[in-house]
């Protein structure tokens, strides 16, 4: 049974022979950890290369990566979820698996914390890690005749403060809403713990292939999210933007200006994002509960109480 039909499927990930190490170029702490990871990996005689990520990924920067990326088996990202998204966008077409190391704040893509780095790397290099897949969505922008993929979300939002924009939403050709809102988010299960969650959307397991549609601060419209099956298509049409139109964003990395009448068609992608983990993602709900504060900090489960009484 493949991941597309199972919530728990994962496959063994063989020890990589070439690893890329990336981090935000403005974070000295991330740079130091990257150096430490590279040194630690020397004991395995693995080939490594380092990639400081600039704030903006220019075409020139992208074109200069081909030599380093060639033959890479794993990309380790040191930073936060934004770093993982940016790095993934660079290597997505090459289907290189990603492992995220989180610094500081909340993160769902960058799962490994600093204290776990060596143990995680040891499991990766000793054939004890797993590979699992996350769904992508494709957005076809009709006015540009181009298509881009997103791991987290595709968003149409206002480009200026002070007024809402109006967006028509269709599912499989059926008009379901006119959202007069700050934005409309089309999110994957991965993106369900991001912008969509802050707008009141539900949390989906990361292996789920359904798509979320969530309006942001809708005016005179119910704010329910819709969970759309993966075989359906969503079309969003900007019918009224600000004076300058609106903005279309793919994972917050690629942005395009939209004019009134512009449309984007979003559907589940045939491609997937590959991530490496040492636990197969089976404790996803535990991580969500802890990171979103669903349990009191002093909570003790009934199982612990039972064990204490024995």
Image (tube, rainbow, N blue to C red):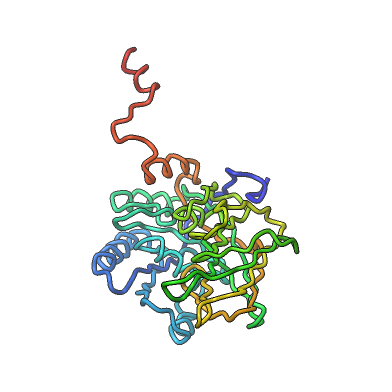
Q: Nearer the viewer, residue 85 or 275?
A: 85
Quarter-wise, where is residue 264 in the image? bottom right
Residue 284's place in the image compared with 80, above or below, is above
Kindly identify the residue that appears in the image at 43 percent across and 53 percent down.
Answer: 108
Whether residue 141 is visible here, answered yes or no, is yes
Residue 62 left/right relative to 173: left
Q: Position of residue 282 (x, y in %)?
A: 50, 41
Residue 25 image position (x, y, % from top left) = 31, 74
Judged from this view, the residue extending furthest toward the bottom is: 60
The quadrant of the image that shows the C terminus is top left
Instruction: Depth check: give the residue in front, 214 or 23.
Output: 214
Which residue sits furthest top?
310
Residue 86: quarter of image: bottom left
Q: Position of residue 54 (x, y in %)?
A: 36, 77
Q: Is residue 282 rendered to the left or right of residue 299?
A: right
Q: Residue at x 33, y 53 (%)?
A: 117
Quarter occupied by the N terminus: top right
Q: Tell which residue pokes out farthest to the right in this image.
A: 173
256 or 109: which is nearer to us?
Answer: 256
Residue 90's x, y, as percent?
49, 73
Say which residue appears at 67% left-offset and 67% top-offset.
Answer: 235
- Where 147 falls versus 309 (above or below)? below
Q: Nearer the viewer, residue 64 or 295?
A: 295
Q: Left or right: 260 with respect to 175?
A: left
Would you say residue 270 is visible in this rendering? no
Q: How many marks?
A: 0
Is 291 drawn above or below residue 221 in the view shown? above
């Amino acid at each position: 049974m493949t991941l597309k039909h199972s919530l728990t499927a994962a496959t063994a990930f063989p020890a990589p022979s070439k690893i890329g190490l990336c981090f935000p170029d403005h974070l000295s702490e991330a740079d130091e950890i990257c150096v430490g990871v590279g040194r630690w990996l020397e004991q395995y005689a693995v080939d490594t290369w380092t990639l400081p990520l600039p704030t903006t990924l220019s075409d020139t920067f992208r074109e200069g990566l081909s030599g380093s990326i060639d033959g890479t088996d794993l990309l380790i990202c040191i930073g936060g979820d934004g770093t993982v998204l940016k790095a993934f966008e660079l290597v997505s077409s090459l289907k290189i698996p990603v492992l995220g190391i989180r610094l500081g704040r909340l993160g769902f893509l960058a799962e490994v914390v600093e204290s776990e780095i060596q143990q995680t790397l040891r499991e990766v290099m000793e054939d004890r890690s797993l590979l699992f897949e996350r769904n992508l969505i494709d957005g076809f922008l009709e006015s540009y005749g181009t298509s881009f993929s997103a791991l987290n979300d595709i968003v149409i939002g206002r480009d200026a403060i002070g007024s809402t924009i109006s967006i028509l939403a269709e599912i499989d050709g059926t008009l379901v809403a006119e959202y007069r809102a700050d934005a409309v988010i089309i999110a994957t299960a991965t993106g369900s713990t991001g912008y969509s969650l802050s707008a009141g959307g539900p949390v989906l397991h990361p292996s789920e292939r359904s798509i979320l549609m969530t309006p942001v601060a809708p005016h005179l419209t119910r704010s329910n999210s819709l969970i759309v099956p993966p075989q359906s298509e969503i079309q969003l049409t900007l019918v009224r933007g600000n004076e300058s139109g609106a903005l279309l964003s793919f994972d917050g990395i690629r942005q395009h200006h939209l004019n009134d009448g512009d449309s984007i068609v979003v559907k589940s992608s045939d491609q997937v994002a590959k991530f490496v983990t040492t636990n197969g993602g089976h404790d996803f709900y535990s991580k969500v509960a802890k990171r979103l504060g669903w349990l009191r900090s002093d909570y003790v489960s009934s199982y612990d109480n039972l064990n204490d009484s024995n």
